[in-house]
Amino acid sequence: MKQVLKWVSCLGIGILLGLGLGYPLYRCPDTKEAYELHPAKDGYVNKIGEIVIPAPYEDKRYFSQGLAQVQLKGKTGYIDLRGSLAVPAKFDDGGPFGEGLAPVKLNGKFGYVDGSGNWVIEPRFSLARSFSNGLAEVQEGDLWGFIDHLGHVVIPPTFRESRCFSEGLAPVVTSSDRWGYIDRTGRIVIEAKYTEAFPFSNGKALIQVLHDRQWIDWTGKRVE
């Protein structure tokens, strides 16, 4: 089967879906920066392989909202489009910026910093992911929920796994061990019956039932 790639934008998190493969391919972050700048050994290269941002860091991730996660002496920070450190490399781990904030880990807990590295949401989560549609996935214990930009819990952590909100819905794994979709209140709006489920893009989402992959609309109805 011919491989077809589809980009599903999820603000702070981008997902590149490889249809025709046995699994989806993930790629972070979203926005056109992810297409135009690619991390390489000595920095970031453009589409034809030219180094446009020298960045001799130990580890480099894709740009999101003008900032890219890098590692220096084992610590995580963020560089700008000139290759300069905009957020000091002082964190233990991190994720891409989304809606002006990035999840970072310090002393075993995740919180969120702004583009200058200032704490906006103090570290208190086991894991945390980027903001999308005004909400971010956070893990407390073994369960996932969602917070707003102030760190307030909007959807309590009751799900075994989750993915980002897109077009008002988010895929989650319920106690049934199946994926379904919730709205911004945490209400299940598409029944949890899928083996896999991914964020919506342009009114459609990719789901999987056993080995059968298909697209559904906002009501859960199968579409082409």
Image (cartoon, rainbow, N blue to C red):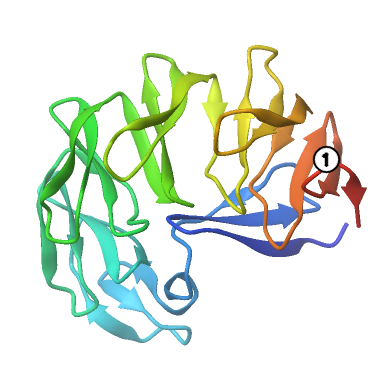
Residue drawn at x 71%, y 63% is 202
Q: Quadrant of the N terminus?
A: bottom right
Q: Quadrant of the C terminus?
A: bottom right
- Residue 161, image x, y percentages: 54, 26
Q: How many marks?
A: 1
- Residue 28, image x, y percentages: 46, 56
- Residue 211, image x, y percentages: 85, 34
Mark 1 Cα within 10 Å, few/some/many (few <14, many 20+)? some
Q: On the image, numbered disc 1 is attached to which residue?
A: 220
Type of amino acid under label 1: Gly
Residue drawn at x 61%, y 30% is 172
Q: Is residue 40 above or below residue 13?
A: below
Q: Is residue 195 left or right of residue 10?
A: right
Q: Is residue 170 above or below residue 18?
A: above
Splitting the image into 4 quarters, where does residue 142 fall? top left
- Residue 58, image x, y percentages: 21, 55
Q: Nearer the viewer, residue 120 or 54?
A: 120
Badge 1 marks a residue whose secondary structure is loop
Residue drawn at x 20%, y 71% is 55
